[in-house]
């Protein structure tokens, strides 16, 4: 007479364990997406601008568009197949220059929040032409932005939305 096999070593046992693992991973992934996640970004590109662009927020996805709108003072190395730029041109601030400093980029499902602050440059900080108007390009990986629906991007200063932008799936 043969001994019965333990449940875990039978075909049904293996199938049960695999299904249970898939369900648990799916639930964790769903909870993780609901809780949101931080997105790595680069923002070292300070952009000179003028009052016609002040207080605007734009998506830039090609080198030609970047060169036309931003006119960077130094050569910029961006892989446009893997990255895109969210460009914020700050509003005028009294008589001194202010630099836009992004603090964090956080995605919750179909909303991306970019926290930033305005800083007065120190003496050794390289300033750009024009005393009152500056901008910043926030470079994001396209893979972290993929969505089947529109993405709402909010700029937040002191937890207050200052600008919003909608990105459609075909722009990513």
Image (spheres, grey):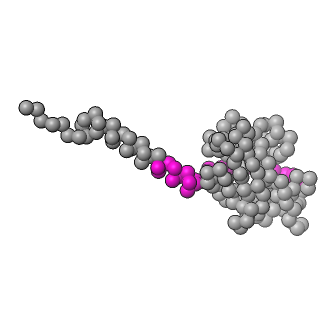
Residue 61 seen in this snapshot: yes
Judged from this view, the residue extending furthest toward the top is: 1
Along the line of sight, the residue nearer the viewer: 6 or 88 = 6
In the image, residue 23 above or below residue 81:
below
> Which residue lies at the image location 73% right of the left edge and 43% below the top edge?
168
| Magenta-highlighted residues | 27-50
Q: Is residue 140 left or right of residue 4?
A: right
Q: Quadrant of the C terminus?
A: top right
Q: Position of residue 84 (x, y in %)?
A: 71, 42
Was residue 22 drawn as part of the magenta stretch in this picture? no
Q: Residue farthest to the left? A: 1
Q: Residue at x 77, y 43 (%)?
A: 60
Rendering coords of residue 151 (x, y %): 69, 48
Question: How many numbered marks have been drawn onto this rendered protein structure?
Answer: 0
Taking the image as shown, residue 70 lies to the left or right of residue 111, namely right
Q: Residue furthest right?
A: 52
Between 101 and 168, the residue placed more toward the observer is 168
In the rendered image, residue 41 lying in the magenta stretch gets the answer: yes
Give how far across and how far down residue 127 sits, in percent: 82, 56
Vertical relation: 135 (above or below) 9: below
Q: Could you tell me which residue is drawn at 65 percent across and 41 percent down?
A: 148
Q: Residue at x 37, y 44 (%)?
A: 20
Viewer-proximal residue among 122 and 94? 94
Q: Position of residue 102 (x, y in %)?
A: 70, 57
């Amino acid at each position: 007479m043969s001994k019965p096999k333990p449940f875990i070593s039978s075909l049904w046992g293996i199938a049960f364990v695999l299904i249970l693992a898939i369900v648990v991973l799916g639930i964790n992934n769903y909870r993780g997406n609901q809780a949101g996640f931080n997105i790595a970004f680069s923002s070292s590109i300070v952009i000179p601008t003028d009052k016609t662009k002040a207080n605007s927020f734009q998506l830039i996805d090609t080198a030609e568009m970047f060169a036309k709108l931003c006119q960077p003072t130094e050569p910029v190395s961006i892989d446009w197949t893997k990255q895109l730029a969210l460009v914020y041109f700050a509003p005028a601030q009294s008589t001194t220059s202010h630099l836009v400093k992004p603090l964090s980029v956080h995605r919750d499902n179909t909303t991306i929040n970019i926290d930033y602050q305005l800083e007065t440059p120190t003496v050794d900080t390289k300033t750009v032409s024009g005393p009152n108007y500056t901008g910043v390009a926030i470079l994001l990986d396209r893979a972290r932005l993929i969505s089947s629906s529109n993405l709402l991007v909010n700029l937040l200063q002191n937890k207050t939305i200052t600008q919003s932008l909608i990105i459609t799936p075909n722009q990513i």
